Amino acid sequence: MSALPSYTQNGQTITFAFAQPLQLTIVTPEIIRVFINRGEQGESYAIEGHKIQATDFTIESAGDHYIIRTSALTIHLDSERHLDTFDKDGNALITDYRGERIHLKGVDKVHERLVEAEGHSVTKAPTKSDQGYYEIIKSLAPDEYLYGLGDKTGYLNKRGFAYDNWNVDNPAPQLEILPNIYKSIPVMLGLKNGHPYGIFFDNTYQSHLDMGKESNHYYFYSAVQGNLDYYIIGGTTLKDIVTNYTYLTGRTPLPQKWTLGYQQSRWGYSASQEEVQAIADNLAKYDLPCDAIHFDVDYMDGYRVFTWDKDKYQGNPKKFITKLNQQGLKVIPIIDPGVKQDSDYHIYAEGLKKGYFVKSADGDVYINKVWPGNAAFPDFGRPEVRQWWANNGKFLTDLGVAGIWIDMNEPATFEGPIPDDVVFNDQDTPSTHKKMHNVYGHNMAKATYAGLKEQTGNRPFVITRAAYAGTQKYSTVWTGDNRSMWPHIQMMIPQLCNLGLSGFSFTGTDIGGFASDTTSELLTRWIEGAIFSPLLRNHAALGTRQQEPWAFGEPTLNIYRKYLKLRYRLIPYLYDLFAKETKTGLPIMRPVVLNYDQDPRVRDLNDEYMVGDDILVAPVVQKSQFKRLVYLPAGNWVDFWNGAEYAGNQDIVVDTPLDKLPLFVKQNTILPWGPAVSHISDEPLKAMTFRVFGTQGTYQHYQDNGRDFKYQSGEWNNYTITVDHNKVNVQLTHHGYQPVYQQITVELSDHVVKLTYDNDSSCYRE
Ligand code: GLC
């Protein structure tokens, strides 16, 4: 072994004098950045602002390695640059693999052509032949589970699979064999012998994560270019890892309350005002709670973004939007990045004149085809372009839209991929598509968020398809074009759960499935299984069969309505979870393992999830399944439907007729139970009900105006509801928002307690 290199220390950054110097930055006791400068300039897109906290740490030489220690993490670094991380008790978390990779056998060019001739694809990960390539290999223990990576396809535990980080719009069914989809969120969370850790690889270039597919002994990260820049994240629990990761990359901001309502969509509706009106009327006629209708690309004039085809809207889209609003429905239009190449079109003309579009290496505006035909692509990496885009949104907010759905922002192109060398700016520095591709959607989301905030003063509602780590600060996401097939409802659970572990708390799938024809049974099971997904939207592709809640008649309609009504009752609970999430980063919809990381039974569980800490959901995601096994983790559980009690740490068999979503509440939980409404109104609620599952418990309930940013200056209330042996106490523990609830009802198993607010004493009394 060679001698240990010398090191220098600058604040909390230690630089070790290897041939390529290695830097460790102690960000917090639980977060350490590992960095090797490989010549790449520019700031992180995922991490904004100053994150380094004053932290005590020590560094000592132990002969053949250095030991760097914080109160939570210990790193060993040897002269060969092997880096091993342990938790404070000495348990290994992330350790460099000492052997060589044993590459999987590939095929030669001749056979590759044969395989491709029949329409199959050959796996092509970045290789050492790419200039700038690097890889990091870490050991895998036999008992090690890997999570995260956003909404990559497959299972909750990613071990045994490999994925690419390169945002694509791939129409192939999103099955476990797909290496990449619309988002690149290169954070992985692990449980090694039960000990939690996280690693976040902050590099926007195309990268690859082999999670033990090539070998059972290691996992590796490789990238085609960029600095070696990753964060080691520690903590006592898996929850700590999520909290620390979202401390670094940001948290989903508190949404407007109505965004938690049901949303109806279909590609095609917006081609005619009459069709949208019919949808709105049917929602009312069939007594289906709903808060928004989405307007897909057809509302535009020839797919020109920031235009509205007035001919389809009796000359006055604003009037129609106002009418829908009066019916309790908000309007969410879609916006794509591709700007139609048409010199008579003001957005294109202005973008061209000001040089806002990305350019080919030869300096011409780069053109590719999307919905409007030939289109140019705004250079969202530039602050000035983001501001321009944000301002353009005023056209929509002036019409009265309540949010913007952004799509095709991988960016997707119909005539082949954008060449790597097309010039995209990195802030104000010319860069390449190769570097900026994976943050294109991120920057578009950031621009859209800024515009909505400026123009409406409300908490922006943006839904994006493409994303990078950190996009959760600006946008909710959906998983893109799934299909109406059982494997896709199955995948919804791991996809949304892994998004939650990856910092994205506001997520959803196209309910019923986007492409292909759904069936009444699939649609029914989908609305049941998705009923707690924060973004609750039914959306389908043009040309597929209708899949509105009424499209199949009974019993689908009745069941659909029953679950929408349940959802609306529990919106206050979801909103409370969001209020907590802004402080902890813990997702609303989460895998059971996040709450019970020491229970080996839940580490590979793909068909159950939890909502916060209190509700366990075991959806039916198999066709014709009228009984299912439900695993209940530790504790006691109450069947939501009939109050039956079960001890945890066991599997139970549950009947699952078509209208039944198995739902269990942790015993001694108090849940808010909102009023039965058809829309989330802007009017403050005057009363709230709480339901007690058990005989005691305590619950924190959050209240604000549900709309704007006044809560940030203290305009919110917190209620503490305590039930102890059937005695009820309600306290207003922070009072910054008017009006407070005048009445609070607490429903216990055998009686109901009603409390009234006494303004003079600011107390609730029976
Ligand atoms: C993309 C979107 C889909 C949308 C369609 C038309 O496929 O993912 O949701 O309906 O484009 O805009």
Image (cartoon, rainbow, N blue to C red):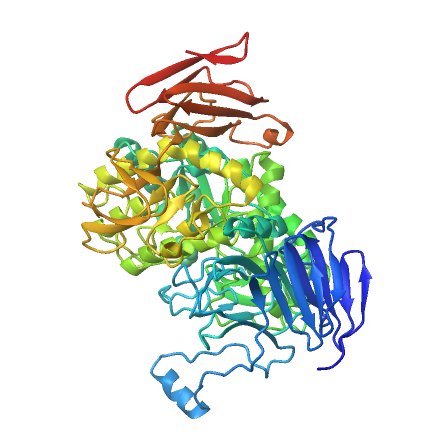
- Nearest the eye: 59 or 441: 59
Say which residue appears at 49% left-offset and 66% top-offset: 413
Q: Is residue 273 above or below residue 627?
A: above
**Viewer can see residue 303:** no
Q: Residue at x 78, y 74 (%)?
A: 5
**Drawn side of residue 593 relative to residue 418, left or right:** left
Residue closer to the observer: 630 or 37:
630
Question: Where does the image place residue 499, in percent across and percent down from the top left?
Answer: 47, 54
Residue 515 visible in the displayed image: yes
Q: Which quarter of the picture shows residue 76?
A: bottom right
Image coordinates of residue 706 in percent, x first then y, are: 51, 30
Q: Quadrant of the C terminus?
A: top left
Left-right relation of 584 to 482: right
Q: Which quadrant of the structure image shows residue 490?
A: bottom left
Residue 625 locus on image (x, y percent): 20, 53
State how many labels appear.
Answer: 0
Classify the position of the N terminus by image quarter: bottom right
Quadrant of res 562: top left
Residue 569 to residue 468: above or below? above
Q: In percent of the image, x 30 and y 60: which residue is there? A: 487
Q: Residue furthest top?
A: 760
Q: Relative to 13, say whether 766 is above or below.
A: above
**Quadrant for ligand 1?**
bottom left
Camera-nearest residue between 671 and 653: 653
Residue 608 point in image, percent of width and height: 34, 50
Q: In the drawing, does residue 90 fall left or right of residue 627?
A: right
